[in-house]
Every structure is written in structure tokens, then in C-alpha cells.
Image (cartoon, grey):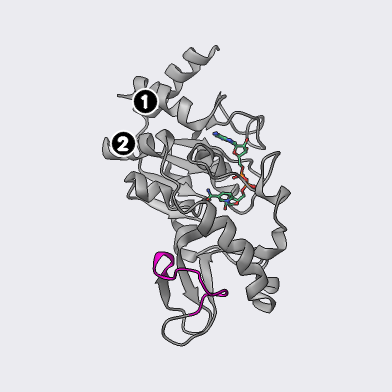
Amino acid sequence: MDGKTKLKEAAKIIKASKYTMAFTGAGISVESGIPPFRGEKGLWNKYDPKVLELGYFLQNPSGSWHSIREIFYDFFADSKPNKAHEVLARMEGEKLLKAIVTQNIDNLHYEAGSKVVYEFHGNSKKLKCLECGELTDAADIGFKNIPPTCPKDGAVLKPDFIFFGEGIPEYAYEMSFIAAKKCEVCLIIGSTGEVTPAAFVPRTARDYGAKIIEINPEGSLFTNHITDIHLKGEAGAIMKELEKYLF
Ligand code: NAD
């Protein structure tokens, strides 16, 4: 199948489906200016992943926070949703999409207007107090002092996304697998399939009979195993084309 035929086929399958979900990874936000962790231009070529290890963070909050501030709150603070986020939000509004399960912590699905979003790895826009558990908006913190501290009790704040060594937020986990078992189509966008347990979400969808459509400029661990239609290319560009056939 050529690219255009694949796009048409994907649109046909989505339109015929009673329950379509999307599963998004770091790749969907690349065109918003946020690099992935892995790969050639990945963040782990510049930063040491240990700054996001829970044990290291708890022992060296200042050391970790210097990198965390730079990565998540200086560089990416002004990132805006791109066409791929926008088309997913439109699909939900027009009843062509029931839920998004995202590995991303950048809040861009909500900013694009999506309502049903299960954030498998949490969200960077809130910070959680290590003592009282209270959440504070990152935007209210300012980050002049590192580590940032809780306005109530002065204890260290941690971003409300999961670090290596932490469990998946319970609600997001449960809802993601409910969606995976229910869906007839799972649209995977920009994920290597290397990060588990997140990668088990589309695999579960497949096990329960869903058709898998994947958007990625490269192959992934999903491509040769569970993907039915691989739309090869960047998320924004492909979703712009897909939109023409969907509406
Ligand atoms: P990942 O599994 O999310 O992989 C990124 C994938 O995106 C790769 O397969 C790559 O080929 C693909 N890609 C690159 N550019 C693309 C584009 N323009 N359009 C579509 N696909 C594109 O792996 P990771 O980057 O190692 O991230 C691991 C985890 O780290 C994520 O699951 C997430 O929790 C977190 N993370 C989040 C963000 C974010 O919130 N935006 C950014 C980096 C990492």
C-alpha cells in the first residue's frame, strides 16, 4: 500500500470503529519542541538519567532539581500543542476518539482541548510536597530557590510525574487498561514501545482484538509485531493528512 492508500484505509477503520483510543509517546511532542529521552537527539545524550531516579532525588534534591528545572521548566515551559494534539482533540469532539493514554508529562493534550486523558506517567505542571502531599502549581513556584519547597511546610517539592523506581498512578493505570480492553482501534503515536508497563497498553488492545494504527517516522517495537497500518512520518504532518480523510 502506498502512503495515501494507507491514510485512507486508516481513516476508514477509525470511522467504522465504535471505540478508538490513542496511545501517545514523546514523539507526538517533538514538533512542539520537546525532544524525546532516547535516540540521536534524545535528552539522555545531554543529561544523566539518574537525576530522575527516585533514590538519587531523595538523597540529592538540589543536584537533581538543577537538571529537572532546566529540562522541564526552563526549556519546555512555553511549548504549545502541535497539529497532532489538535487533531486528536477534534476527533474527541466529533466522537471519533474516546480516550487518550499518554506517556507524556507535558500537559499538551489538555492544552489542545482533549478531555479524556489518562496520564500514565503523571504531569509536570504540578509539584507534590514530599511531606504533606499537597500539590502546588509549578507556575506559582518561580524556581529561584532550588530545591523548591512547599509553601505550607517548607519540605522539598517533587514534580508530580513518576521517577524511575516509582509506580504508575493507580487511576490512570486502571483506566488505561479498561480502554485498551474495550477499544476496537488503537492509534499509537510516537512511541518506541520500550517503556513498560506503558507499552503493555497497546499490546493489550491488540490481544483483545483491536486494530493497531501507528504513526512514527521510524519503526518501533510495535511495528513488526502488532501494527496493522504504519503511517510513516512525523506526527503533525501525518495527522494533518489523516484529518482530511476523517472529516
Ligand atoms: P518514547 O517511547 O516516547 O519514544 C519516542 C518515539 O518518538 C520514537 O519511536 C521516535 O521514533 C518517535 N518520534 C520522533 N519524532 C517523532 C515525530 N515528529 N512524530 C512522531 N514520532 C516521532 O521514548 P522516550 O523518548 O525515551 O520517552 C520515554 C518516556 O519519557 C516517555 O514515555 C515519557 O514518559 C517521558 N518523556 C516525556 C516527554 C514529554 O512529556 N513530551 C518527553 C520525553 C520523555
Part of the protein shown in magenta:
137-149
Query: x, y (%) of residue 166?
Result: 61, 67
Residue 38 vs 140, above or below: the answer is above
Q: Secondary structure at mark 2?
A: helix
Q: Residue at x 27, y 39 (%)?
A: 93
Q: Nearer the viewer, residue 187 or 203?
A: 187
Query: x, y (%) of residue 124?
Result: 49, 60
Prevailing secondary structure class for the magenta stretch in the rendered image:
loop
The image quarter containing residue 241 is top left
CA distance separating discs 2 and 1: 9 Å
Q: Residue at x 68, y 75 (%)?
A: 60
Query: x, y (%) of residue 91?
Result: 33, 35
The image quarter containing residue 137 is bottom left
Number of the label disc, if any, that sits on residue 90: 2
| Amino acid type for the residue under numbered disc 1 | Glu
Q: Residue at x 46, y 84 (%)?
A: 132
Ligand 1 position by quadrant: top right
Total numbered badges shown on the rendered structure: 2
Neighbor class of circle 2 (other Cα within 10 Å; few <14, some 14-19, many 20+) is some
Q: Decide: marks 2, 1 in contact (CB < 8 A)?
A: yes
User: Which one is earlier in the sequence, the residue at label 2 or at label 1?
Assistant: 2
Q: Secondary structure at mark 1?
A: helix
Query: x, y (%) of residue 150?
Result: 46, 80
Give the quadrant of the N terminus. top right
Whether residue 227 is visible here, answered yes or no, is yes
Instruction: Name the residue beneath numbered marker 1.
Output: 243
Q: Residue at x 57, y 75 (%)?
A: 147
